[in-house]
Image (cartoon, rainbow, N blue to C red):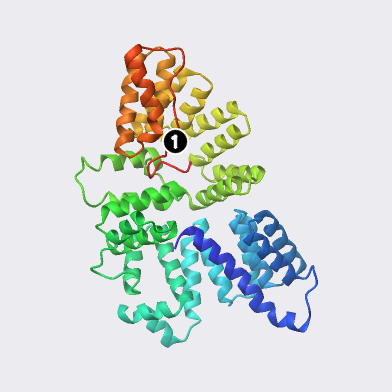
Amino acid sequence: MTARVTVALAIALAFVSVWARTAGAQERRPPTAESPGALVERARAAYAQGRHQEALETARRAAVAAPRSVSALLALGGMAEFMGEFDEASQAYAQAQALAPNDNVTRYRLASFATRIGDYDRALRELDAILGTQPKSMQFFFRWAPAFLQKPLLKRSPALEQFVALQIDILMEKGDVAAARRLARRHAVVDSGRDYCAEANAKKTGGGSPDEVFKAFRLAVLGQPSAADCIWWYGQWLTDEGYMRLGRLIVTEALKHGDSEERKQPGYRYVRSRLAGGREVPKRAESLFLAARQRYLRDGDVDGAERLLDEALRVAPSFVRPYTMKARIAQDAGNPDDALQWLRRGLEADPDSWRALHNLGRSLLELERWEESERALVKAVQLFPEDMEGRLRLARALYAQGKFDRYAAETRNALQIARGWSRGSAVAGAATFLEKFERWGPGAAPPPAPDVEPLLGYGQD
C-alpha cells in the first residue's frame, strides 16, 4: 500500500466514521447548514473535488461547532494530517482519543498518523490495542494460524488486510525489513517459491497502473530478498517520490545482494549523491517536505508550502530537498538570486547533492554566468555520469567560454548516453548542432541544452 493510498484511506475512514456515528442523530433531527454533520459532509465534498484548503477550513469549523464530537475531531485530524499541519492533527487526534479512549477507528487513525511522523513504536502499540479488543480466539487465530488459513481470512476482510498492510509498512519504515518479511509470510501476503520480481517487471513493461506497479515491486521486496534488481528499482522509485528514509533503506538492502563490489559502485554513488551519503532523514521532516511539495504543485499554495518547508528545515537542517524546493518556488516567482541562495544553502548542508548542483548549474547557465555554471555542472556529472541534461548544459557553458574541444567531448558523451537510454529524440537538436560544428566550426549562437526525461531515481525534484 502506497503512502498516498494510506493517507487517502485514513481520510476516508475518518469521514465514514462521522456518518456511522451521526446517522442515527440525523434520522432524528434534520441537519442544518452549519451542523457538524453537514460541515463534515461539505469538507468531504471539497476534498473529493480537490479543494483541499477549503476542506481543512470546513473541518475546523465542524470541530469548533462540536468540540466533543469524536467524528468531527477525526475529520479535522485527517485533513490537517493530509495538509501537513501535524501539530493541529496531533491535537485533534489527542482530543478524540481522550473522548473515546477505546475507539478502534481513533486508534487506527493514531497509528497511521504516528507512522507519518516517525513514532513507530506508538503506531505498533495502537495496532496491538486494536487487536486486543477482539475475542481471544480470534487473536490467537490471527497471530498463530498457518499461512494457508490466513490468506482466505484476509481476502474476506479488506479491513484486516489493510491492518496487516499497515503493520508491514510500519516495520519497513522503522527499518526492520526482516520482521516485515516474516509478518508478510505469516499472513500469506507473499508465498514462497513465487517469482514476484518477474511479475513486477511484467506489470512495469505491460502498462500496469502506477499503483499496480508499485505494489508488485513491494511484494518483490517482501517475498524475494535476493531479487536485487527489483529491490534496487523500488528504492529508486521511492527516492524519486520523496520517501528518502525508506528509499535509503531499500537501496541499501539491494546492495547487500547480487553483483560484485565493482558493479555495485553506481549504487554506492547513488547513496552518496541522492540519499545524503546514507544519513538518516527524520520522518517528520520528510513528511513535511512531501506535504509542502503537494501544496505548491497541486494547490498553488505558496505561503503554506513555504511555511511547511521552513518547518522541515528546523527539524532537519541538513535535509537538502526543502532547499531545492524553496529554490524552485523562488525561480518560479521570478527571483533568480533568491533561488541561487537557496541552492547554495542546500549545498552547504549536503555538498554532494547531485540535484542541488545540477539545479545550481542550470540556474547559473540561464543567467549566462558561464564559469560558475561550469564548476557546478562538472561536479554534478561526476556524481551522476549518466546525467544527459547536465552534460548538455555543461557543453553549452563550455562553448560560451570558447572551450570547444571540451564542448564537443561532453556533447558526444551526452548523445551516447541518451541513445543508450532511448532518449535520442530528445537530444536531436544537440546532435545536429554538433554535426554543423564539426563541419564548419563554431558559430555565433550557443548550442541547445534541451530538457531530457530523467532516468529512474533522478526525477521529481
Which residue shows up at 21% across the image and 51% down it? 258
- Specify whether 64 is left or right of 175: right
- Height in image: 168 above or below 429? below
- x%, y% of residue 179? 34, 65
Within-10-Å neighbours for mark 1: few <14, some 14–19, many 20+: many
- x%, y% of residue 369? 50, 18
Q: Which image quarter holds the N terminus?
A: bottom left
Residue placed most toward the observer, 106 or 207: 207
Residue placed most toward the observer, 350 or 358: 358
Which residue shows up at 47% across the image and 35% down it? 349
- Height in image: 334 above or below 29? above
- Height in image: 19 above or below 361? below
For the question of whether residue 143 can be seen, the reply is yes
- x%, y% of residue 232? 32, 50
Dividing the picture into quarters, in which one does residue 403 lie?
Answer: top left
- x%, y% of residue 203? 35, 59
| Residue at which label 1 appears | 355
All told, the count of numbered labels is 1
- Height in image: 397 above or below 254? above
Residue placed most toward the observer, 390 or 148: 390
- Specify whether 363 is left or right of 188: right
Dividing the picture into quarters, in which one does residue 184 lie?
Answer: bottom left
Dividing the picture into quarters, in which one does residue 279 lie?
Answer: top left
Which structural element holds mark 1?
Answer: helix
Which residue shows up at 36% across the image and 61% down it? 216
- Amino acid type of the residue tagged 1 in the rendering: Arg
For the question of whether residue 146 can be seen, the reply is no
